[in-house]
Amino acid sequence: MTLVLASASAIRRSLLENAGIALVVDPADVDETAIKQRLAAQRVPTQGAAVELAAAKAKAVAARHPGKLIIGADQILEHGGKWYDKPVDRSAAAAQLTTLAGSSHSLVSAAVVIEDGTEVWRTAQSVTLHMRPLSPAYIDSYLDQVGNAALTSVGGYQLEGLGAQLFTRIDGDYFTVLGLPLLPLLGYLRQRGTLVS
């Protein structure tokens, strides 16, 4: 069965395809900022908020793909009780990295599967990342090297690339850092017979 990924994330697509999943990519058009603001105002915990965002993405494209499994995914970075978004420009990325440097933050990645408009599965996993102290000169050098890639992830880094140099330790699952709780998702797909077990 071909699955539909309701996300524009190249890394999520790559993770699923590398795991042998045949995909159609149909990114959802949802107002993530408005949804996050509503969830924050309701004091929804970070894991619950990530799941709700993932579900909103999957539901937004479900009507276009009847009879197919739709995968929605989302990731939230939490530091000091605050949620962070992808930096909008280089100066925002530098400010965010300066805030995160020398401390720990959490990444929560969620996935939701929708079938014929009904949610059939959901999960969220959290990872704690310990970032080493970073000098302003190092942050500038890092941003020079990674360029616009710093604007494509919520933390301003890609752990699978140069971003690995920012950290001293990671507590949790690698795939969750990349934005998808891949192993639980594969387990669900095997359980329901979508994948050979």
Image: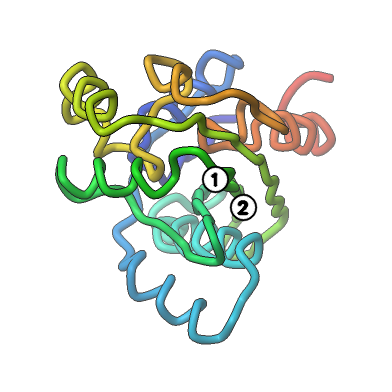
Q: Amino acid at mark 2?
A: Val
Residue depicted at x 56% and y 59%: 50
Q: Amino acid at mark 1?
A: Ile
Q: Is residue 5 above or below residue 112?
A: above
Residue 33 horizontal side relative to residue 13, left or right: left
| Circle 2 residues within 10 Å: few <14, some 14–19, many ≥20 | many
Q: Is residue 21 above or below residue 154?
A: above
Q: Badges 1 and 2: C-beta atoms under 8 Å apart?
A: yes
Q: CA distance from mark 1 to mark 2?
A: 6 Å
Residue under pointer 1: 71
Q: Where residue 58 appears, x then y in whole percent? A: 49, 56
Q: In what element is the residue under mark 2?
A: strand
Q: Where residue 166 appears, x then y in whole percent? A: 45, 25
Of marks 1 and 2, which one's residue comes earlier in the chain?
Answer: 1
Q: Where residue 155 appears, x then y in whole percent? A: 40, 41
Residue depicted at x 65% and y 37%: 181
